[in-house]
Image (cartoon, helix red, strand yellow):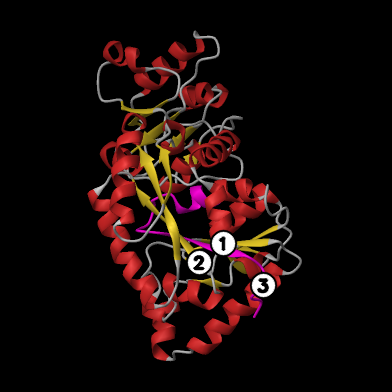
Amino acid sequence: MNSLTPRVFIAATRQNDGKTTTSLGLLAALQHHYPRIGYIKPVGQRYVEIAEQKIDEDTVLMDSVYKLNCPLVDMSPIAIEPDFTRRYLESANYDALARRLQQAFDRVAWEKDFVLCEGSGHAGVGSVFDMSNARAAKILGAKVVIVTRGGIGKPIDEVALNQALFEKEGVEIIGVIINKVLPEKMEFIGDFARRGLERRGLKLLGVLPSHPILARPHIQAVREQLKAELLNRPQRLNNLVDDVVVGAMAVHNALPFFKNGVLLITPGDREDLILAAATAMLKETGQTLAGIVLTGGLRPNDTVLKVINELPYPVLLAKKDSYQVASDVHDLIVKTRPDDLEKINVIRDLIGRYVDVETLVKAIQ
């Protein structure tokens, strides 16, 4: 296996701590040091099918944004299908998995100056089929950066747990990046987190502030989460949702809530609210709702459907009731997509400003 190409493994203390966001930004920052960069996600849990191959969603994102010129199937060598774990436990073949990962890395690293490896979840994820993040990092011969969520006590406690497993596998941890920190607490958390990490022999590589846009889902993600029907054909399926309003009040009480970026959730038979939302927003130049979700599987009458068809923002029809729809939207895991250009630019800027990339590069070399 290739042992010459520099590499780093981006891990996290748990899911949704910002590992993919960090990886996305680091690829841009590291290109200043390594012009030809490769990417690999050893174990993928969320995948899409491309040319009959199961490819991790994050791999698709990285390739779409950076045009990495690596085979997609090698950047996503192990996709966890629904019955993958059961089949592995019935007839385990660790050596075959390890060889697949090594061979995929060799192809990804071909003619590259650097390879970024992205883990999935905490250090122990994948242990059930003998391919934990810690084990994958060891197989790849990669040093590790751990991403954790804002705070002092809990993040360092969680880093310590992950550190123990990486060290058990003989994997070196370069440092830690703390993500999603309230801007007004960055200096305070940075100071004390640095002290706490140093007591564990770890470096703090950066503190990233939370940014509102990164937590905002767009309508297409809402549609997929709800498995909702699109009732019109607007040009703005990527509208970002700033706020959610459940329309369960009289029209005159609802009007103040119809603002730019609002997602209105209301039963499909509340035609008074639907028409009021359409009329109110059309009067505001350049101001539109993010979209409307009609609930309960209740389809409006033909007259209202004609109005909906002319609206410039998406109107979705969901089978669930308003409470469940609102709950699903609230719990939606916001993932960055290739066409989220504004988010991608924000991510690049945050990593470039707040992460000590120079120290990271020196540690890798």
Do callouts 3 and 2 mark residues in contact (Cβ within 8 Å)? no
Residue 157 in the image, given as x and y percentages of width and height: 25, 58
Q: Which residue is mark 2?
A: 143
Do callouts 1 and 2 mark residues in contact (Cβ within 8 Å)? yes
Amino acid, disc 3: Leu
Q: Which residue is mark 3?
A: 4
Relative vertical location of residue 120 with respect to residue 132 in this rendering, above or below? above
Amino acid, disc 2: Lys
Identify the mark at residue 208; answer none if there is no mark.
none
Residue 199 appears in the picture as rendered: yes
Residue 292 or residue 170, whichever sits in front: 170
Q: CA distance from mark 3 to mark 2?
A: 13 Å
Relative vertical location of residue 214 with respect to residue 121 in this rendering, above or below? above
Relative vertical location of residue 318 with respect to residue 15 in this rendering, above or below? above
Which residues, given as a range, are shown in magenta? 1-23
Q: Residue at x 39, y 86 (%)?
A: 89
Q: Residues within 10 Å of mark 1 (few under 14, many from 20)?
A: some
Q: Secondary structure at mark 2?
A: strand
Q: Quadrant of the N terminus?
A: bottom right
Q: Residues within 10 Å of mark 3 (few under 14, many from 20)?
A: few
Residue 298 in the image, given as x and y percentages of width and height: 37, 36
Residue 22: in magenta span = yes
Relative vertical location of residue 274 with respect to residue 350 in this rendering, above or below? above
Identify the mark at residue 364; answer none if there is no mark.
1
Residue 52 appears in the picture as rendered: no
Amino acid, disc 1: Ile
Residue 329 in the image, given as x and y percentages of width and height: 36, 40
